[in-house]
Structures are given as structure tokens and as C-alpha cells.
Image (spheres, rainbow, N blue to C red):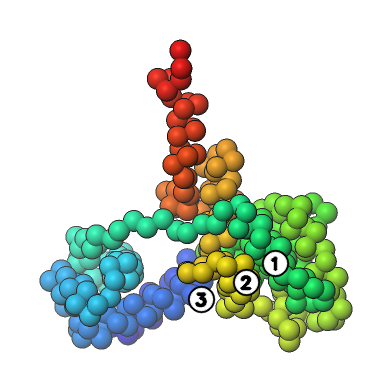
Amino acid sequence: MKDYIDKFIRYLDLEKGASSHTLRAYRKDLREFSESVKCEPNNIDIIDLRGFIAGQIQKGLNKTTVSRRLSSIRSFFKFLYREGYMKTNPAKLVSNPKVPKLLPRFLSVDDVFSLVEKPEGIGFLPARNRAVLELLYSSGLRVSELSGINTDDIHIKECLIKIKGKGKKERIVPIGSKAIDAMKSYIIERMLLKSKERALFLNRMGKRLTERGVRRIVVKYARAIGIHGRIGPHTLRHSFASHLLQGGADLRVIQELLGHASLSTTQKYTHLDITHLMDVYDKAHPLAKEN
């Protein structure tokens, strides 16, 4: 099984351009599956797959995790079948466990404003942290995208930034005026470090700021303004999409800005409160209008 998993991971890396995070997740899921079934792919049938799913649920894993692992396994067998390593695809007819649809958390406009304004003081770290928070919200970036930005990707005068998204796909996104101001202040502080790193955002040692470092910044200032519970860079990305939609932006435009291949993915990131929904209904539905 290990050789087949290695072939699949290599395919995801070289042909699909999957991120290192995605590759690790697939490998972890498939290793768990391999250790459970303990046989080669051609000897696996639908009963083995259903048994694996049942075993995962019995271990106490939530249905979201089990569903993700099944998705990894399904992609794995689809690859083996397409490449001719298997005569049939046993995962084709296996259904996912029902997963409750949970809307991602997003912040109010006031909370976002409080968050991005919270880093106080002068110097490299406060300037960097303000720029990180402003850019995450201003452009709706993934944490991996922000960490991966290089100095030659940002164009201050044009208020644009080049982003390398999932599958190494590049896109150009705008930067808001507040984020531009924060970026200008940060770049001055960054120049004083005289670092030879290509990375735009650096840690205190002058090296590229990691995804974990970005998460720590978001959590630190969220806690400082009284926002608790599960929060991270993706919360700002979802807030970006939600606020644009509430402001009247077209869903297709939001899709392009977020770098989603599918519109259905964008719809999962959007959330409207009932007040806004009723407002749109009252303005748009012909029977809702007063005569």
C-alpha cells in the first residue's frame, strides 16, 4: 500500500500543485486507512471501506473528520483506477456520513475595526502586526497566501498584490487604503532590518513569518479586544466575504477575489443575518412591496 500512496502523493505534488499542508493531510489520512485495512488496494472492497468508516466513528472521531478522510480515500482510489492500477473503484459507491452544515464564524464590522486598530506602539512588531491584520481583512487572504507573499509581489502605487493560491494558481487582488497605509509603515520598519529574505512578512529573527506566527497574531489581538472562542486568520477571510456580500458585491466577484475554483465553495463562506435577508426581500420581491 505504501508504494501506491507515495505515487498518489507525488501526483498531487507535481501535477496538481497541492500545498505542503494538503499533502500532509492526505498522507496522514491514507496512512490511517492503510494501517486499518492491512491489505493491498486490489484486495479492498466496499465492505472494507464501510468497516473503516464505522471504526472511525466508534473511535469517537467527529463526522467532519471521518468525511474528510473518506474524501482522501475516494481521491486515492479514483487515481489508482484512472492510472490502471485497479480494475474497479471500490470507493465510488461509498457515501459520506451526514455532516451538519455549520456556518463559519465571522466578525461584525465594528469588531474587525477594533481588531485591526488594536496593535499599538511604534517599531517593527506593532507595524508588522497592523499590516498583517489589515491585509488579511482587506484582501481576504488565506493564511498560507499571506505567509507566502514576497517583497516583489506587492505593488503599493497600484494598490495591488499578487497572490499564489491553492494549486499554485496566481491571482491579482486589490488592497484597501487602510491596508496600504499600514503596509507603507511596515515596509519602512522592515527595511531597517536589512534582511536578505524575499518574504514580505518577517519574524523578529528576520526570517519568513510562518502560518503559525500569523495565527498567533490574530488570536493575540482578538483576545485583547475580548473576542474568545475559535478564531483565526480564516475568520477574517470569511468576514471579508460576508461584508462584501452584505455591501452588495456580486458573488462571482467575491469568488474571484477569494480565488475559489467553484462558486459553491464561495457560497459556503458567505453568511447573511436575517435582518439583511429581510431587507433584500422587501426591496426585491414584488409581493413584498406596499401598493
- Proximity of marks 2 and 1: CB atoms separated by less than 8 Å: yes
Residue type at numbered disc 1: Lys
Q: Which quadrant holds residue 53?
A: bottom left
In the image, taking residue 45 as reference, residue 100 lies left or right, namely right
Mark 3 — residue? Answer: 20
Q: Which quadrant holds residue 90?
A: bottom left
Given this view, does label 3 or label 1 mark the residue nearer the observer? 1
Mark 1 — residue? Answer: 118
Which residue is farthest front? Answer: 226
In the image, taking residue 240 as reference, residue 9 lies left or right, namely left
Task: Give me the disc on residue 224.
Answer: 2
Looking at the image, tell me whether mark 3 or mark 2 is earlier in sequence order: 3
Given this view, does label 3 or label 2 mark the residue nearer the observer? 2
Q: Which quadrant holds residue 140?
A: bottom right
Q: Residue at x 49, y 32 (%)?
A: 280
Q: Which percent across, then down, holds residue 225? A: 62, 67
In the image, taking residue 243 as reference, residue 84 lies left or right, namely left
Q: Nearer the viewer, residue 221 or 265?
A: 221
Residue type at numbered disc 2: Ala
Q: Is residue 249 visible?
A: no
Q: Which percent across, then down, holds residue 146? A: 64, 67
Q: CA distance from mark 3 to mark 2?
A: 32 Å
